[in-house]
Image (tube, rainbow, N blue to C red):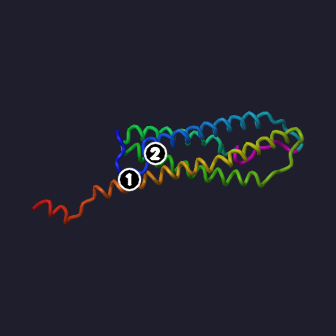
Amino acid sequence: MAPRAWSKLSTADALVLGAIQILMGIFHVFMWYLLLTLYIGQTPGVFGIYSPITYQAGCSLWGVVFILSGALIITVARIPYPCLITGAIILNILSILLTMIAVILTVAELFTFHSLSYRNYGQAKLGREVSRVLLLSYPLEFVVAVSYSILTCSDLGRDSEDNFTTVTDEAERGF
């Protein structure tokens, strides 16, 4: 289906935004797998093991939501059904919320660091570097989700305004 003439978001733009979200989601899932293998390999020492709050909450695994959101954006670009558009907007709003929560948790993790056993220090240091890389990738996910949500919501608002008729218009058509 061709995009409407007044649409602010073209099909190509939607496809690019969806592809970016899918790639970011895959990146986050791979980073989660790296953290999983990193933190499972720790040995209990005198000071314990390093288990940051972002790892416990599974912030990197939230990339699955980014993948689903991007896939739904691509589906909507090809088949723009109203229920799919609503689902894409809902998933993008969820992505925005998860991104903000992940940024808050990652900043909290990076500002707190407890002493560790010398055996686990290298793993903790590498895990914190992965968290820094993820912290740099969250703004891109946030901007993609916000831009798609705003442009799609503005298009939906404009569509409902075009279909809106006043009582006087209806009365004039009757004559």
Which residue lies most toward the bottom here?
168
Secondary structure under badge 2? helix
Residue nearest the observer in this picture, 75 or 35: 75
Whether residue 122 sits left or right of residue 105 in the image: it is right
> Residue 90: horizontal and vertical position, in percent?
47, 49
> Residue 63: horizontal and vertical position, in percent?
60, 41
* Residue 10, numbered label: none
Q: Amino acid at mark 2?
A: Ala
* Residue 156, numbered label: 1
Q: Residue at x 84, y 43 (%)?
A: 48
Q: Residue at x 39, y 53 (%)?
A: 155
Secondary structure under badge 1? helix
Whether residue 54 sits left or right of residue 153 in the image: it is right
Query: In terms of sequence position, does the residue under pointer 2 or pointer 1 come before the other?
Result: 2
Q: Are marks 2 and 1 in contact (CB under 8 Å)?
A: no
> Which residue has dot 2 on it?
88
Q: Amino acid at mark 1?
A: Leu
Residue nearest the observer in this picture, 121 or 133: 133
Residue nearest the observer in this picture, 80 or 90: 80
Query: In terms of image quadrants, where is residue 41?
Result: top right
Residue nearest the observer in this picture, 14 or 121: 14
Whether residue 28 sits left or right of residue 171 in the image: it is right
Circle 2 or circle 1, nearest the eye: 1
Whether residue 1 sits left or right of residue 39 in the image: it is left
Query: In terms of image quadrants, where is residue 77?
Result: top left
Q: If the image is split into quadrants, where does the C terminus sit?
A: bottom left
Query: Disc 2 versus disc 1: distance between alpha carbons?
Result: 13 Å
Q: Residues within 10 Å of mark 1 (few under 14, many from 20)?
A: some
> Residue 11: horizontal and vertical position, in percent?
42, 42
Q: Which residues are magenta?
A: 47-55
In reply to whether residue 93 is colored magenta, the answer given is: no
